Image (cartoon, rainbow, N blue to C red):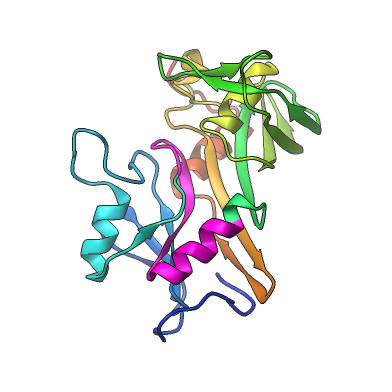
Amino acid sequence: MESGPCPYPGDPEPGDAGARPSSGGIVIIAYRDGIVAVSKPEGMASIPDRRGSPGDLHSMLQEILGARLYVVHRLDRPTSGVVLFARTAPVHRALCMAFQSGGAAKTYHAAVLGHLEDRTISLPLRRFGSGRVWVDEARGKPCTTVVKALEHGTGYTLAEVRPQTGRLHQIRAHLAAVGHPVAGDTVYSKDSCGAWPRLMLHASRIEVQSSGGGAVFEAPLPEAFRFLLDRARTGAPGEE
């Protein structure tokens, strides 16, 4: 849900009617003040890929709403959770400025492999030719990720993760680099994908601040995430 006044300029729009499902598993969280907030399902691209494959979030949402939407940020295809779009150019500029200036605080939930304690990870990351992102002390860009352990189980930790910067694969690469990759990650923890058949990373919350106020957008953990977490808690066997 969204709380607090939204300071971004835009045309008057209908107020929120609460989170509501749409086609393709997309859940519309908020639709007001020039902002459309949705919960993206896992496995869906945020924007069209280079091949122009159908079924990306941006294209589907524009078709559903019958309106042009401006891309503000994106999530990796296997990551679920909150994504914001702008309805107007002024709102787009305001949101992009907030994201670039540190005025957008993002919170994720992740199930990672092993016993992970609270920590701050500050390691420079660089994208290599293969598309994989990894630590590069010489040529990498500065990145910081704050991790808070919420629950320890057998072979896993449920954590709250707050990236302080917004690099590609930042959370996934940082956690893998310290020996605790996200469960179900086909890039950084491929061997875990039998027991964890989805990437256990979910964008739970975005809080956007500006001089005029702020807005909070939240998406609860999806059913598949909760099912796999509950299975790990009870020790029920998964596919190996």
Position of residue 168 measured from the top left corner of the image (x, y, whole percent): 51, 32
**For the point 57% across and 39% down, which residue is it?**
230
Position of residue 110 measured from the top left corner of the image (x, y, whole percent): 60, 37
- Viewer-nearest residue: 144 or 23: 144
Please indicate whether residue 210 sits to the left or right of residue 20 in the image.
right
Q: Quadrant of the C terminus?
A: top left
Picture layout, residue 233 above or below residue 36: above
Position of residue 216 measured from the top left corner of the image (x, y, whole percent): 61, 66
**For the point 79% across and 32% down, which residue is it?**
120
- Viewer-nearest residue: 102 or 118: 102
**For the point 62% across and 63% down, which residue is it?**
208
Q: Is residue 9 visible?
A: yes
Q: How many marks?
A: 0
Q: Which residues are magenta?
A: 75-98
Q: Quadrant of the N terminus?
A: bottom right
Q: Is residue 219 visible?
A: no
Please indicate whether residue 45 sits to the left or right of residue 120 in the image.
left
Position of residue 102 measured from the top left corner of the image (x, y, whole percent): 67, 52
**For the point 22% across and 46% down, which residue is it?**
55
In the rendered structure, does residue 20 fall within the stretch colored magenta? no
